[in-house]
Amino acid sequence: MGNQPSIDEIYLNNHQIIEVSPIIINVTILGGTVSDAYNTTGGEGIDKLVDGNLSSKYLTRNAQTWAKFKTNKPSIIMRYSLTSGNDAPDRDPLNWTLEGSNDDVNWTLLDQRTGVDFPNREQTIFFNFENETMYQYYKLSMQNNAGTLFQLAEWTLYGPRLAEN
């Protein structure tokens, strides 16, 4: 073909660097098992905490509680959100810890927050933290603002990766 380059002789000299953010997965919506310290059931039971409905809520007649989510597959969680209830700000979480475990016995502290304020009702706040370990269980141990009741509308876990089959 003379001086014309063939297809295997063409080189591209234009290099571009593309930064790709990881895909964030809502791990909670993929299913799992939720429980709490008091086996709270009923219309405002523990299952309302991860039902995806911001208008429902979990309510316990205790100022402190924990909620535990067992994922269907071990997951790396690096972000979570909490949504305040529809009424009574003194029932909102004020202080909490988030822990991860693979055996439901030995726990690793992943995140700790104190003095968090939810100024609005049904308000969702996101929290990021560093984590590179897959866990099967996540436990949120919480204390309310004041009084003898605790409420939370929604708890959602997010991560960039699930365990492979």
Image (cartoon, rainbow, N blue to C red):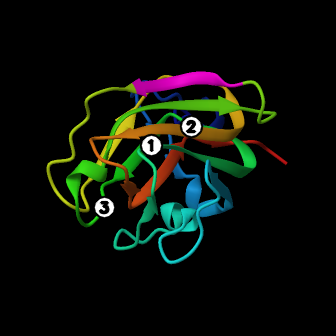
Q: Residue at x 51, y 44 (%)?
A: 65
Q: Is residue 141 above or below residue 37?
A: above
Where residue 29 is drawn, which disc sits there? none
Q: Is residue 134 left or right of residue 47?
A: right
Quadrant that contains the N terminus = top right
Q: Amino acid at mark 2?
A: Ile
Front position in the image: 57 or 127: 57
- For disc 2, the neighbor class at 10 Å (few under 14, some 14 to 19, many from 20) is many
The total number of labels drawn is: 3
Q: Nearer the viewer, mark 3 or mark 1?
A: 3
Question: Is 52 situated above or below 14?
Answer: below
Say if the magenta span includes residue 64. Answer: no
From where the camera sits, is residue 18 visible? Answer: yes
**Would you call the spot at circle 1 few (<14 residues within 10 Å), some (14-19), or many (20 or more)?**
some
Q: Nearer the viewer, residue 103 or 65?
A: 65
Question: Which residue is the site of mark 2?
Answer: 77
Classify mark 2: helix, strand or loop. Answer: loop
Residue, far bottom: 43
Task: Find out whether residue 109 is within the magenta segment.
Answer: yes
On residue 85, the disc is 3
Point out the stretch of residues depicted in magenta. Answer: 107-112
Label 3: element kind:
loop
**Most extreme residue toward the right, as rendered?**
165
- In space, the residues marked 3 and 2 are separated at their CA atoms by 24 Å
User: Is mark 2 in CB contact (under 8 Å) with mark 1?
Assistant: yes
Q: Amino acid at mark 3?
A: Gly
Which residue is labeled 1 in the image? 80
Q: Residue at x 79, y 44 (%)?
A: 164
